[in-house]
Amino acid sequence: MRPASRLAGLVLAAGRSSRAPGFKPLLPLGGTTVIETTLGLLRRAGVSDITVVVGHNAAELLPVLSRLPVRCVLNADYDAGMFSSVVAGVKALPADAEAFFLLPADMPLVRSHTVRLLARSAAKAGADVAYPVFQGERGHPPLIAARLAPAIASWDGDGGLRALLARHEAAACDVAVVDEGVTLDIDTPDDYRLIVERYAGRLYPSRRECDAILARLAVPGAVVRHCAAVAGVAGAIASRLNRTGFCLDEGLITAAGLLHDLAKGRPDHTRRGARIIKSLGYPAVAAIAAVHHEIAPAAGQQLDEAALIYLADKLVKNDGIVSLDERFACSREKFAVDAVAQAAIAGRQAQARRIAAEVERVLGINLAEVVKTV
């Protein structure tokens, strides 16, 4: 990776927010504001030199920014459009910057992991511009070489920055990411509601991000279908339990179910898969995936997200729902002459039965009734 001290951040916060449900940079998000969240993701990625371009509502925004380690630049011509803010910001970049991340203030869901990946990929490719690409769509923040700054500052052609960078397409690279946040901004009230919802679930990937992860790792279709079935079964059980007063995170359960077997077919697939998931920035999902095959008994048989994924995995064979007896009969037959394996299988079956019994006790119905509509 390029030295973090030579990578700058340029955050655009000068626009009018005319279609949004308020001034976008100062909209509430997770106990803070949208712009503070956006700036925080850059700092966590190691980008410490950040310039924020302000304009509309600067008098409201500057007191917030004054508490943060950022440089502020006023674009008095902000009504001329976003490119005027890009130019103002580029002119204020530090002299020693090798490249800069260009990020609108209203894109707080970009993951720090993505920013670091862009830096590594751009350095490896020697690219003038590195674009994050999620499921075929380019997003933000592009990482732009500082050597393009003079051309940006003097550009007077039509089409703004997009048109200028198109001239450098031969020296650009696309970086495939599993981060839906690179395409999510706040233009409308519906956009803002989605940002708030996704921010609340930021500890796990969205469904689209799970799909992108599975595709990137070339997980076989049969495994993908098994994972989807496990996610469906675990989600159905969690939904019923939550109606009784539980506070299970159904989004976390869905993500863990969809990803739990992503390393299936490879040696030590459970731990290998957990390591991959953790490396992508999802430790909570990784912790569940790490115990989906074998989970330690809990006092009083705690019904948490990990227990439900463990149980669901034992209720699904291939991509079909089966009983615990059917599921474990296959395992016992496969290892019929291996006494050690037989003992392990018996232990896993006993644990699955304990979890199932607790689910049935809480719900007051047979487990088969809960999962039959999945």
Image: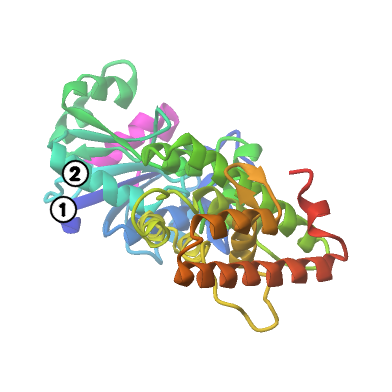
Residues 305 and 84: in front is 305
Mark 1–mark 2 distance (CA, rounded to whole Å): 7 Å
Read off the magenta span: 73-90
Q: Is residue 200 left or right of residue 160?
A: right
Circle 2: residue type: Ala
Q: How crowded is the residue under tag 2: few (<14 C-alpha within 10 Å), some, or many (20+)?
A: many
- Residue that appears at 18% across and 35% down: 149
Q: Is residue 96 left or right of residue 322?
A: left
Mark 1 highlights which residue? 6
Q: How crowded is the residue under tag 1: few (<14 C-alpha within 10 Å), some, or many (20+)?
A: some
- Is there a contact, CB below 8 Å, between mark 1 and mark 2? yes
Give the image location of residue 137, x and y in percent.
Answer: 41, 28
Task: Point out which mark residue 99 bears.
Answer: 2
Q: Quadrant of residue 352?
A: bottom right
- Residue that appears at 67% across and 53% down: 326
Give the image location of residue 361, x and y in percent.
Answer: 83, 71
Residue farthest front in this picture: 337
- Residue that appears at 19% across and 23% down: 168
In what element is the residue under mark 2? strand
Give the image location of residue 105, x and y in percent.
Answer: 44, 46
Q: Quadrant of residue 173?
A: top left
Give the image location of residue 119, x and y in percent.
Answer: 23, 47
Q: Quadrant of residue 112?
A: bottom left
Q: Is residue 215 above or below residue 325?
A: above
Q: Quadrant of the C terminus?
A: top right
Instruction: Tell me the chief SS of the magenta region.
Output: helix
Circle 1: residue type: Arg
Mark 1 and mark 2 lie on one chain; the one further toward the N terminus is: 1
